[in-house]
Image (tube, grey):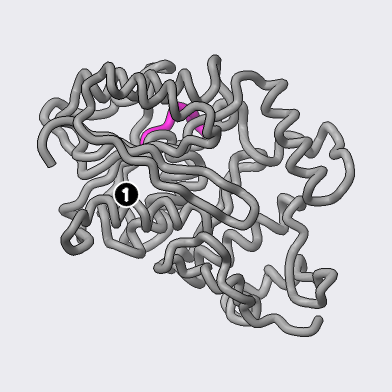
């Protein structure tokens, strides 16, 4: 390999994103030597991993969380969503800017964040706690994901006072059933399932792996990127976010800002229409970019700032 030092800044990543300069493989390997089994030379001769290999991505995530966010224990069940850390960190940093407004970024446990669909990986709370010392409530419907997230919290010192994982028993509810009367948050965040069917999710994974490896994946590989509830729901992300908006309008005092990722730009016009109908007083769209991937955060609120 020519070099294992960080490369040029990653285009589009937030200025405070720790991964903006690329992956520092020497530092990561010093913290997490097990990553070495998956590091290889890229065509340019620099260090990289096979991003189509679930084990390699898992090892990289574990190293990043340990080295950059002080997470000594991080393990998720096979087949559950293993998200790219830089992109998840970007959401957290842009949320911090949103909460700051024209003032200082709020820090400390008095700033409470509600993470809808925290997942087995618990990544947003892990990053938000390290970067801003926020307090998180993460909600989840899947028992195995809940157990994994709670184990991560329990096995890392200092997290139990900052991260609470709650079970959502109502399959189609977003906020109902997991928040108490009078409870409020600075913001909610969500990475919704964006496919409308299992077939669409499998096709999306096929395209992703073909782009990474240049070949069609086997059936056994198709599920490495997430469980069914993480990848798809009836109506896709548009239907999911519309439900979220309807519930937010019914309890506008719950969050100062409601936010969610929106993967498909064509969903923005109908979502803006839904927010207008719900009488949201302010709506913002925050663009996100990580490599070739483009996404956006949709944020809305009710009442005065």
Under circle 1, the secondary element is strand
**Residue nearest the viewer, comparing 238 with 123:** 238
Q: Looking at this rendering, what residue extends furthest in the right direction?
A: 215
Residue 233 appears in which quarter of the rendering? top right
Residue 25: x and y in percent read 65, 76
Say which of 158 and 283 sits in front: 283
Relative to residue 123, is residue 223 depicted above or below? above
The residue that appears at 39% across and 20% down in the rendered structure is 242
The residue carrying mark 1 is: 163
Q: Residues within 10 Å of mark 1 (few under 14, many from 20)?
A: many
From the viewer's perspective, tell me whether residue 272 is left or right of residue 303.
right
Q: Position of residue 104 (x, y in %)?
A: 18, 63
Numbered range of the magenta stretch:
139-144
Q: Position of residue 108 (x, y in %)?
A: 20, 60
Q: Is residue 124 left or right of residue 193?
A: left
| In magenta stretch: residue 146 | no
Q: Residue at x 65, y 52 (%)?
A: 292
């Amino acid at each position: 390999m020519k070099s294992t030092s960080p490369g040029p800044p990653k285009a589009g990543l937030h200025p405070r994103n720790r991964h903006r300069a690329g992956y520092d493989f020497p530092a990561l390997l010093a913290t997490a030597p097990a990553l070495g089994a998956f590091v290889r030379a890229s065509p340019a001769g620099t260090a990289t991993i096979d991003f189509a290999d679930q084990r390699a991505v898992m090892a990289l995530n574990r190293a990043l969380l340990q080295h950059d966010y002080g997470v000594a224990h991080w393990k998720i069940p096979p087949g559950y969503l293993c998200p790219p850390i830089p992109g998840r960190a970007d959401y957290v940093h842009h949320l911090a800017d949103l909460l700051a407004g024209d003032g200082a970024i709020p820090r400390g446990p008095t700033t409470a964040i509600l993470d809808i669909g925290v997942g087995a990986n618990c990544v947003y709370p892990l990053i938000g706690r390290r970067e801003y010392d926020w307090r998180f409530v993460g909600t989840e419907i899947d028992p195995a994901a809940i157990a994994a997230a709670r184990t991560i919290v329990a096995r890392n010192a200092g997290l139990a006072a900052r991260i609470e994982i709650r079970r959502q028993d109502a399959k189609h509810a977003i906020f109902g059933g997991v928040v108490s009367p009078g409870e409020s948050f600075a913001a909610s965040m969500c990475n919704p399932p964006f496919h409308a069917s299992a077939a669409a999710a499998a096709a999306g994974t096929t395209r992703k792996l073909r782009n990474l490896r240049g070949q069609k994946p086997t059936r056994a590989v198709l599920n490495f990127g997430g469980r069914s509830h993480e990848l798809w729901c009836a109506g896709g992300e548009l239907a999911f976010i519309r439900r979220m908006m309807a519930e937010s309008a019914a309890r506008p005092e719950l969050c100062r800002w409601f936010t969610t990722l929106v993967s498909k730009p064509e969903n923005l016009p109908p979502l803006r229409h839904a927010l207008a109908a719900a009488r949201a007083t302010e709506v913002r769209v925050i663009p996100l970019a990580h490599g070739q991937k483009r996404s956006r955060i949709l944020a809305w609120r009710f009442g005065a700032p």
